[in-house]
């Protein structure tokens, strides 16, 4: 799976919960109040299930789930998707 | 002996006595451990019970029908065991998990405080840095089965924010004071637990510092809500059964109560409530089995519906019994008291409504135009 495919998959999941507001890949969905406190758990379940990965406690830091960019970066760090190519 | 037989022979007949004496024998939990019920919230590959989530829900429903106090003790144990399996580091799991799964040790959940309930992030219990240890100071209240519990999952504040840590009951500086005469769940024996500079190793911290609420408490409460949804569905069934038996055995105005249409209306409502609550927790169980993110809101919905419907069913069950419903000879007075408590625990029903509404405002919104 490419990074852009992973990005689209994460966005599609989030858009089930964030319907009436546009948000960018870099936006902090928690700081902007777009999701409730249960979303952290839902994101962990979603990413672990759909990307077949098990996160460590250190990786479960909220900062890794704050934005689509952060989640894709975490998946890249775990080798689930390729790392971004330097510009 | 099957679990069903054990419940019928060794739990149901004693539930009233346990309620009056405000205690449950520890041996009952040991026996439930032998039936695999104390490891049901732990994945099988970590030593937990091999059954499905549906199997677990069926067992919880049967226990809730017999004794909601026992169900609540199982609930907090399941929350603690789950959290250890999900969030503890390997060496902490080595210290606790096998004994929790087998039932050799009983887990507890210490979140509420005298001044902190629904706003769980605001707990005031302090976790002070003491090198490789935490020094814990504070008071927890409404903590189930504290005198039987071997290890508490405690949510406190460290310098990094809400942090969860395991604390053995036998720790120096930990004292327990029972709270008797409660409205419901009397046999679960709620307590106040005070931590006076209790020292525990930091390696018993669950997840990272600052993640005690967002990850540990939230996910443990999700397990708790599943247990309460299933158990309370069992309590609705108990209300229906007691009401049907009574209505078929008592004669008023020269006909059986069951022939009176206003009695039938109440029985119809509680029967419908049972089937709906049963269907909701089964839906949640199927999603939980698949680790589907939808399971979280389905569980919340199942808990909210079952507990709200149960409060109504228990009220109607007392109504059908008339004055007998208020006396000690019939169990519906216990059902009524216990049903009321289910609306308050593992997140009050107002908190459940907020979460369900936030989800519904997204789920049922028309797709936006782009």
Image (cartoon, grey):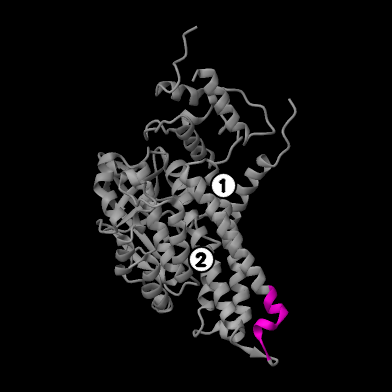
Total labels: the figure holds 2
The answer for which chain carries disc 1 is B
Q: Position of residue B205 (x, y in %)?
A: 33, 43
Vertical placement of B176 versus B16: above or below?
A: above
Q: Residue at x 72, y 33 (%)?
A: B367
Q: Position of residue A83 (x, y in %)?
A: 44, 16
Q: Residue at x 69, y 93 (%)?
A: B254
Please tell me whether mark 2 or mark 1 is closer to you in this view: 2
The answer for which chain carries disc 2 is B
Q: Check residue B256 for magenta coloring.
A: yes
| Main secondary structure type of the part rendered in magenta | helix
Q: Name the residue nearer the viewer: B43 or B109.
A: B43
In this view, the residue farthest toward the bottom is B254
Q: Label 2, on which residue?
A: B234
Q: Name the residue nearer the viewer: A17 or B161.
A: A17
Residue B297 is marked as 1
Q: Is residue B173 visible?
A: yes
Q: Residue at x 52, y 63 (%)?
A: B232
Which residues, given as a range, are shown in magenta?
Answer: B255-265
């Amino acid at each position: 799976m490419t990074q852009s495919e992973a990005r689209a998959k994460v966005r599609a999941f989030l858009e089930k919960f964030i319907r009436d507001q546009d948000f960018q890949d870099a936006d902090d969905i928690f700081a902007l109040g777009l999701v409730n406190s249960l979303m952290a758990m839902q994101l962990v379940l979603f990413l672990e299930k759909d990307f077949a990965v098990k996160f460590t406690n250190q990786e479960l830091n909220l900062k890794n789930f704050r934005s689509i960019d952060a989640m894709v970066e975490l998946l890249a760090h775990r080798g689930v998707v390729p790392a971004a190519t330097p510009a | 002996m099957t679990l069903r037989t054990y419940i019928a022979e060794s739990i149901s007949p004693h539930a009233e006595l346990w309620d009056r004496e405000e205690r449950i024998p520890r041996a009952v939990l040991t026996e439930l451990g032998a039936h695999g019920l104390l490891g049901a919230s732990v994945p099988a590959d970590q030593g937990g019970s091999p059954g499905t989530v549906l199997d677990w829900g069926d067992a919880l429903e049967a226990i809730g029908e017999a004794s909601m106090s026992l169900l609540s003790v199982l609930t907090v144990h399941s929350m603690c065991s789950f959290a250890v399996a999900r969030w503890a580091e390997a060496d902490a799991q080595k210290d606790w998990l096998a004994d929790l799964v087998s039932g050799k040790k009983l887990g507890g959940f210490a979140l509420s405080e005298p001044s902190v309930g629904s706003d769980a992030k605001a707990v005031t219990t302090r976790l002070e840095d003491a090198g490789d240890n935490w020094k814990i100071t504070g008071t927890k209240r409404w903590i189930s089965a504290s005198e039987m519990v071997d290890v508490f999952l405690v949510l406190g504040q460290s310098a990094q924010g809400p942090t969860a840590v395991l604390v053995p009951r036998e720790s120096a500086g930990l004292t327990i004071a029972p709270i008797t005469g409660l409205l419901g769940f009397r046999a679960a024996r709620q307590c106040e637990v005070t931590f006076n500079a209790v020292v525990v190793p930091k390696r018993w911290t669950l997840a990272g510092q600052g993640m005690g609420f967002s990850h540990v408490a939230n996910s443990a409460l999700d397990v708790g809500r599943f247990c309460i949804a299933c158990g309370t569905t069992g309590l609705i069934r108990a209300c229906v059964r007691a009401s049907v038996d009574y209505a078929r055995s008592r004669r008023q105005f020269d006909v059986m109560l069951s022939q009176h249409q206003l009695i039938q209306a109440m029985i119809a409502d509680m029967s419908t409530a049972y089937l709906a609550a049963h269907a909701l927790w089964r839906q949640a169980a199927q999603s939980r089995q698949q680790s589907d993110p939808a399971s979280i809101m389905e569980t919340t919905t199942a808990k909210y519906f079952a507990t709200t419907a149960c409060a109504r069913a228990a009220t109607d069950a007392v109504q059908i019994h008339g004055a007998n419903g208020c006396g000690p000879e019939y169990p519906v007075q216990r059902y009524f008291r216990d049903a009321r408590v289910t609306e308050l625990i593992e997140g009050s029903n107002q908190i459940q409504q907020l979460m369900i509404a936030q989800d519904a405002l997204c789920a049922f919104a028309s797709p936006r135009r782009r």
